[in-house]
Amino acid sequence: MLKVFIYPVNSLILADLVERFGHKPLVVMNQVREKVTNISLDSPPVNITPEDPKIGLRFAAVEVPAGVRGRMSLIGPLIEEAEAAIIVENPPVNFGCVGCNRTNELMKYLVRSKEIPILEVKYPESNFEAREFVYNISVFLENLSKASGEKKLDPQSGNAEEFKGEAAEEKKGKVKLEKKNDSLREEIP
Amino acid sequence: MSSDELETVKIALVSCGSEYAGVQPEFEAAAKQVNAKFIYPEVDVDLIDNIGKEFGLEVASGDLKLMMARARAVVEGLSHVDGVFITTCFRCAEAAIVRNEVRRYIHRHSNIPVISYSFTERTSAGTLLTRLEALTTVARRRHLLAREAQTGLTAGIDSGSTTTKAVVMKDNKIIGSGWVPTTKVLESAEDAYSQALKEAKVTRKEVQALGTTGYGRFLVGKHFKAQLVQEEITVNSKGAVYLADTQKGPATVIDIGGMDNKAISVEDGIPGMFTMGGICAGASGRFFEMISKRLGVDITELGTLAVKGMQENVTMNSYCIVFGIQSLVNSLAKGASPEDVAAAACYSVIEQLFEQQLQEVDVKEPLILVGGSSLIEGVPKALGDLLKIDVIVPRESHLIGAVGAALLASGYVEE
């Protein structure tokens, strides 16, 4: 079981898919729930205080707007935990959205900067694309399962990458795969 | 008047997600003080994806699309509100574009009062209070603002950050005035009010109604048991159009105060869009005080000096008062004349006002300049030069708040 960061970070559909394959989706809803249910200063609708944008300084400089840093105080720790990621490009608002595109840009950058397997897929616009979309995500998640089952990955062939590579070839480039460095591949549990 | 006695005003909060910036409790606290309630206009989720094209402004952020969709819901009456508070993150260019356009859109398509503000995580309820008070006043007390003439014997006290002003008015005429530097808020108010009463030759008991405004309005209002305690945006715009005799039609009021500036777009004497600045004292009356002190002249002489100088001869950056003074010191060290420095100081303040505030209101003539700084001759000249329009400085322009308060307080004489 791997911790999979999803983008959009509040997509219920993506979270459900990740869960179905036995992984843990890293979703912002849990962070928000914690903010709402924790006993803290009352700050409706969520207990985000002026301290949170300061926590966000770990991920963005002070000249970055407070709203971005406040969001990053919730999302940044998820990215730090992530062992794999799925990024859906151009999703409509009802698929999931954190509301701020500067935050979107920053979080995608931080995910891509991590040495983890990443699947990037375009949001489907037809029935055929939708099937392909789900299939690609399924293959990626299955391969993560296989990879996470290995005690140690071959640093030369990198089994996890091979699985993903096959999937990508099979689906004619719809899936963008990130070849990550060998040393980190070895660390995948 | 306490917030409990006022009817609740419904304000649509149109923001880019202020709840994530840690400022929501401050927004709520400010709203509570003026008995306002924030509501969040409901919109169809499908509309959010298409609103960019419909509105004509395509942006990437979902919450900015939501802002446009909510503005449309307000304008179309799908959401019944008395006012709109548009707010986005400070330093976000995309949000700044949307904030301005949404404000213009609501102003163009409805009569609902609107204010806008860009926040940081340090935004406090105190900062927002004056703005929300003005917004709720316009929504709640239009009948009071419709008053065009002062009646009876009334007084007004403007407890400002730098000076305290008082006037006594009788039958639409100023019969006494007082102007003192603000030291201790109540003592200064007592002094200014006493001066005005003495000049008017009336006693406090004879005054039928009193209005207070300015930073110290609550304290002074409570002390003198004022009938009207009102923020300076409403009062000053009323006072400005009254003194400039432009109560009908559009007008733009610019008030350069001791600590902050206000730019107010007025229609028939009622404020529409307005902004209130004050990030740094470099663009306020306080800067003139420091410049005068450094040049070794009285502030009343600064204006005369400035009109004789050429601002182009001195580079002055007064965005920050510290850098502004640095520019001044450097210029004098290079041999700049006091006249040129004074002219540059006036131009610098006006330039800041132009860049930071006049972009957020529709500047419509007549342009009325008020506040103590309006008496510095170089200031209206610099403003006129920059905007290429005639600037009106009404008589008693430094007493604008006190006059506005006395005028509005006369509404309580009849009540």
Image (cartoon, coloured by chain):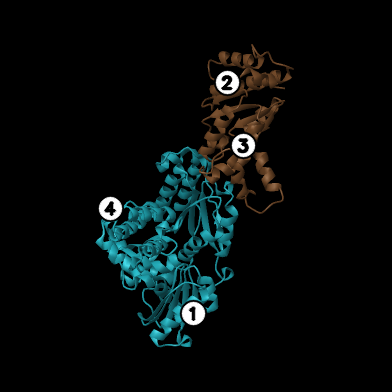
Chain colours: A brown, B cyan
Label 4 SS: helix
Residue kind at label 4, given as amino acid type: Asn
The quarter of the image holding the N terminus of chain B is bottom right
Is residue B366 in view?
Answer: no
* Residue behind mark 1: B190
Say if labels 2 and 4 share a chain: no
| B342 or B390, nearer to the observer | B342
Please name the residue that numbered disc 4 is placed on. Answer: B313
**Discs 4/3, front:** 4
Q: Chain of mark 4?
A: B
Q: Mark 1, chain letter?
A: B
Q: CA distance from mark 2 to mark 4?
A: 59 Å
Q: At label 2, which amino acid type do we have?
A: Glu
Tell me the CA gap for discs 3 and 1.
55 Å
Do tags 3 and 2 sit on the same chain?
A: yes
**Residue receiving disc 3:** A76
Q: Camera-side residue: B273 or A41?
A: A41
Q: Which residue is mark 2?
A: A178
Task: Tell me, yes or no, if residue B158 can be seen here.
Answer: yes
Q: Nearer the viewer, mark 4 or mark 1?
A: 4
Separation of marks 4 and 3 at Cα, in angstroms: 50 Å
Dot 3: chain letter: A
For the residues tagged 4 and 3, is the chain the same? no
Q: Residue B343 placed where, x, y %?
A: 30, 59
Residue at point 65%, 43% (across, down): A32
Q: CA distance from mark 3 to mark 2?
A: 21 Å
**Alpha-carbon distance for marks 2 and 1?**
74 Å
Side of B46 relative to A45 (left or right): left
Which dot, 2 or 4, sits closer to the camera?
4
The vertical placement of A131 against B1, above or below, is above
Whole-number angstrom distance, CA of label 4 to CA of label 1 = 44 Å
